[in-house]
Image (cartoon, grey):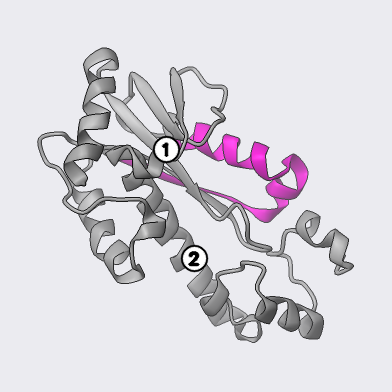
């Protein structure tokens, strides 16, 4: 599977030179940041086992995370916070994070492969790839960095606000999460725009 993902990137690399993959984690949660990662993999040092982060166990993602960072030619992780999400909406906040991640890379790519069907406006050429995290090695690597970085952030937040049990649901709209919101109300790290319809704001 890893070979297929690397072969996908190789086709783009042949045309554009250096290619980076971009993906995000945390568009759906009620709180916390949306996390975006951009990764330029080294084709000479493949990371075995990269795949869509949603298809990997938490243990496997944690094992791959340091390997990706160690072997990548460049990577950048960007967190876009709830206030910005409320101001711009989640789509525009995600696109902003994607642009910041790509433009923050230490190596300038010739092309950015963006997971999904929308590309941010930026100086570097971009190509959207639907279900890219299951097709492109560099996008799947970005999905792992984004997911692990966001989960670690939410676990840290859980220590400061144990009453919300964030380590269990990572901020996603679960039955448990809504029950805890009913009991404790919202904090500054909540996305107010996500909670208006339910009357918490």
Asked whether, in this view, residue 2 is left or right of residue 19, the answer is: left
Residue 76 lies in the magenta stretch: yes
Q: Quadrant of residue 174?
A: bottom right
Residue found at x 73% / y 65%: 188
x, y percent for residue 177: 67, 77
Locate residue 134, reporting x and y percent: 36, 44
**What's the mark number on residue 52?**
none
Q: CA distance from mark 1 to mark 2?
A: 19 Å
Residue on which disc 1 sits:
22
At label 2, counting other C-alpha atoms closer than 10 Å, the crowd grade (few under 14, some 14-19, many 20 or more) is some
Q: Residue at x 36, y 59 (%)?
A: 55
Q: Secondary structure at mark 1?
A: strand
For the record, the magenta segment spans 75-101
Q: Secondary structure at mark 2?
A: helix
Location of the C terminus by quadrant is: bottom right
* Residue displayed at 27% across by 65% down: 60
Q: Position of residue 5 (x, y in %)?
A: 25, 39
Q: Is residue 36 above or below residue 92?
A: below
The image quadrant that residue 193 belongs to is bottom right
Q: Is residue 73 visible?
A: no
The residue sitting at the top extreme is 15
Residue named by callout 2: 153
Residue 64 sits above or below residue 115 on the image: below
At 43% from the left and 52% from the top, the residue drawn is 146
Residue 27: x, y in percent?
60, 52
Q: Is residue 62 magenta?
A: no
């Amino acid at each position: 599977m890893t070979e297929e993902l690397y072969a996908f990137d190789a086709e783009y690399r042949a045309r554009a030179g250096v290619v980076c993959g971009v993906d995000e984690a945390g568009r759906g949660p009620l709180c916390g940041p949306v996390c975006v990662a951009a990764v330029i993999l080294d084709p000479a040092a493949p990371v075995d086992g990269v795949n869509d982060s949603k298809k990997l166990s938490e243990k496997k993602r944690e094992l791959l995370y340091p390997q990706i960072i160690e072997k990548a030619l460049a990577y950048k992780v960007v967190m876009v916070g709830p206030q910005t999400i409320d101001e711009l909406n989640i789509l525009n906040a995600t696109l902003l994070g994607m642009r910041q991640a790509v433009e923050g890379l230490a190596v300038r790519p010739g092309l950015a492969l963006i997971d999904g069907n929308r590309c941010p406006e930026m100086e570097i050429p971009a190509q959207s790839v639907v279900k890219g995290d299951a097709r492109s090695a560099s996008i799947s690597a970005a999905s792992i960095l984004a997911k692990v970085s966001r989960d670690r952030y939410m676990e840290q937040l859980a220590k400061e606000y144990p009453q919300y049990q964030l380590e269990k649901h990572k901020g996603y709209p679960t039955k448990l999460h809504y029950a805890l919101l009913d009991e404790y109300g919202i904090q500054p790290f909540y996305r107010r725009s996500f909670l208006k319809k339910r009357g918490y704001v």
